[in-house]
Image (spheres, helix red, strand yellow):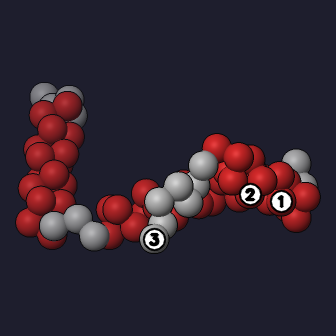
Amino acid sequence: MFEGLLQPMHLLIIFGIALLVFGPKKLPELGKGIGDAIRGFKFAIQDPADASAKNTAAHEHEKEARPTSL
């Protein structure tokens, strides 16, 4: 049903319409915003136990990197 939906010509037409609607100055900002949103979404849906383990490992590494005062 959806085979061949996003062919290269279709993507060029979509990009052209987006360029006309948002303009060349606003388009990079829009792309950056979408990228940040996707990154934030991926971080939010991570397994809580996995995220906790990463935070603990980063915290331990931070403790080791701190100089100790004598």
Q: CA distance from mark 3 to mark 2?
A: 20 Å
Contact between marks 3 and 1 (CB within 8 A): the answer is: no
Mark 1 burial class by Cα count in 10 Å: few <14, some 14-19, many 20+? few
Residue drawn at x 90%, y 58% as measured from the top left: 20
Please give left or right for residue 61 compared with residue 17 in the image.
Answer: left
Disc 1, SS: helix
Mark 2 burial class by Cα count in 10 Å: few <14, some 14-19, many 20+? few
- Up the image or down, 50 lies above or below 68; here it is below
Quadrant containing the N terminus in the rendered view:
bottom left
Q: Which of pointers 3 and 1 lies earlier in the amino acid sequence?
A: 3
Residue drawn at x 9%, y 66% as measured from the top left: 49
Quadrant containing the C terminus in the rendered view:
top left
Q: Which residue is mark 1?
A: 17
- In depth, the one of 25 and 62 nearer the eye is 25
- Three-letter code for the amino acid on which mark 3 is drawn: Met
- Three-letter code for the amino acid on which mark 1 is drawn: Ile
Q: CA distance from mark 3 to mark 1?
A: 25 Å
- Up the image or down, 69 lies above or below 23; here it is above
Q: What percent of the width, then of the height, locates residue 23?
A: 90, 55
Q: What percent of the width, then of the height, locates residue 39?
A: 43, 57
- Three-letter code for the amino acid on which mark 2 is drawn: Ile
Q: What percent of the width, then of the height, locates residue 6?
A: 58, 55
Residue drawn at x 60%, y 49% as measured from the top left: 7
Residue furthest to the front in view is 1
Disc 2, SS: helix
- In depth, the one of 16 and 45 nearer the eye is 16
Is residue 62 visible in the rendered image? The answer is yes
Q: Which residue is mark 3?
A: 1
Contact between marks 1 and 2 (CB within 8 A): the answer is: yes
Residue drawn at x 83%, y 52% as measured from the top left: 16
Q: Which residue is mark 2?
A: 14
